[in-house]
Image (cartoon, grey):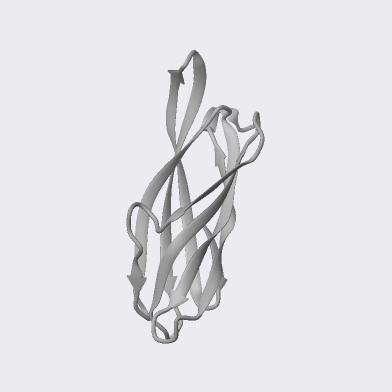
Amino acid sequence: MITQVTKGIKISVQTTFEGTFFKNYKMHYAFGYTITIENQSKDAVQLTSRHWKIYDSLNDMETLDGEGVIGTKPVIQPGDSHTYNSGCLLTSPIGAMKGHYNMVIINNAEKFRVYIPTFKFSAPFALN
């Protein structure tokens, strides 16, 4: 598990290899990830948007931006956490993701970024 803390918000990431399949006559590698966002600060915060950089060893880096996570903009009280699962399709068995969440402190509307540490994807058969 990979973890990082920014301004009292702890991000923990666990990855899994889900399998391979053909799409448009090309092999694809499916990876899953579980992210837990833990509020270790004294303020309630809301996750408003996300920014991802996706690295595929056979392609250029891809950048994705979006509102919230998995269709929600969770409010996380001090001492609470929010966990969600998502996934990524790559055209190679090795890759990585990193990024940040845009957050806001509920009681004063202060905006800040929480950095998501780089986490790696690797199919078990691709490892030495």
Q: Residue furthest top?
A: 25
Which of the pair 4/75 is nearer the observer? 75
Q: Is residue 110 above or below residue 4?
A: below
87 vs 71, left or right, is right
- Seen at 42% across and 67% down, the residue is 47
Location of the C terminus (image quadrant): top right
**Count of labels shown?**
0
Place of residue 50 in the rendered image (x, y in percent of width and height, measured from the top left): 49, 57
Which of the pair 55/119 is nearer the observer? 55
Place of residue 19 in the rendered image (x, y in percent of width and height, measured from the top left): 43, 29
- Seen at 59% across and 29% down, the residue is 126
Q: Is residue 59 above or below residue 65?
A: above
122 vs 40, left or right, is right
Q: Is residue 107 above or below residue 81?
A: below
- Seen at 52% across and 17% down, the residue is 26
- Seen at 57% across and 30% down, the residue is 93
Residue 1 appears in the rendering: no
Residue 44 appears in the rendering: yes
26 vs 107, left or right, is right
Place of residue 96 in the rendered image (x, y in percent of width and height, measured from the top left): 59, 44
